[in-house]
Image (spheres, rainbow, N blue to C red):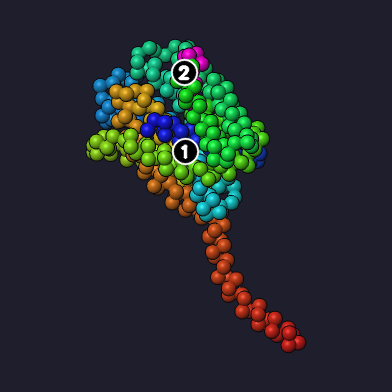
Amino acid sequence: LRIIDQFSISCIALAAGMELKSGKLKKFMRPIAWVLCGFMGATFISSFFVILFFSSFIPFVTGMAVSGKVAVALLISTIMIARSPASAIAIVKDVQAEGPFSTMVIGVSIAADVLIIVVFALNLGIAEALIRGSGLTFYTFLRPLNKILWSGVFGASSGFLMDTFANAGRLPDRGRELLVLSSGLTTFFISSLVPSFFSFEPLLACVIGGIFVVNFGRNVAYHDHLMDRSLPYINILFFTSAGAELEIDHLLRPELLFLGLGIFLLRIASLWLGATLGGWLAGRPSRETSYAWMGYVTQAGVAMGLAKDVAREFPEWGQVFASMMIFQMAINQIVGPPLFKYAIVSMGECRAKQMVELEPTKQKQTPTHAAKNDVLSNGEP
């Protein structure tokens, strides 16, 4: 299952990066940056302190030193920031939404999905140092920054490779598509071979590869079309693989079920706080700010990939951690789409609903216009 998991998550990360088009969100760049600062900061900080305060109620944290509890709170809070741009974009397309509210939600979700991987790389390094007792040194912070740097190098290289395959006209169509989609998989393969100085985060590399392709590639339309067609099947592969790796016995433990539900409720509260602060900093209309948090509830591929990274990095308790986080992600993915649709309709940006409402009006007007035409044809005023 490991190769299926890596292939699917690399495609999801590439797709997330491909949504970050420089021209697409240029008009909203400044408000998106302000919303992102308030949003990520408030969500992360509020979640961190609440989880740290109640850490003694988390079964696998019991017995850990304070430094270990801080590390677990860091990792949970980081994953709670993650969004699902793919889900948000699918909802926008489904209801044919158009307007500043939808654009802001999509822009913030995409930018947050890119930044979350950078923040995760930093916090994972800090968590390793805290749990394994090596202490916080200058190298503790330098190592994640070094990983981010090399992620950029290898990510741009994978993007270039992806674009090269897309322009290889002599290859059969199916073979070319498979090579393009597998370009991100090479980052996972290379990351297992390079020396520690050149170590990098494969997920971040894939996101950067997607950004490179969509902004500097020679065949952007081909990549967009291929991802649109492939992503539904890739999501099926990823979630099937993730479900197969879940430890059901962990999920059936009542304390973990309650913890997962508690983390979900905490995330909702922190999303509301973050969206309110972010909207205020960006000077967004109060009506938009009051509905904004509903657009950020969904979580999917990247968040699940990060939870599984924790499981691999800390095998002693990581699988229980991942099961708990994936359970609350499932709740987010069930509750999130209806909430976002409700927010779009409430903001008056649902074109599908507007067209449905206009249709009966047209039908009512048709006989009136026909009667008017009859009167005119008879020469009557």
Residue 208's spot in the image, x, y percent?
Answer: 56, 29
Q: Earlier in the sequence, mark 1 or mark 2?
A: 1
Q: Quadrant of residue 67?
A: top left
Image x and y of residue 51, in percent: 35, 30
Q: Tag 2: residue type? A: Leu
User: Which residue appears at 37% of the width and 40% of the height?
Assistant: 240
- The residue stretch that appears in magenta: 195-202
Check disc 2 and report its element: helix, strand or loop: loop
For the C terminus, the image quarter is bottom right
Extreme residue in the right direction: 379
Q: Is residue 339 left or right of residue 353?
A: left
142 over 286 or under it: above or below = above
| Residue picked out by circle 1 | 83
In magenta stretch: residue 101: no
Secondary structure under the numbered disc 1 in the rendered image: loop
x and y percent of residue 114 in the render? 52, 32
For the N terminus, which image quadrant?
top left
Is residue 198 part of the magenta span, yes or no?
Answer: yes
Asked if one can make out residue 285 in the rendered structure from this viewpoint, the answer is: no
Q: Nearer the viewer, residue 229 or 290?
A: 229
- Point out which mark residue 91 bears: none
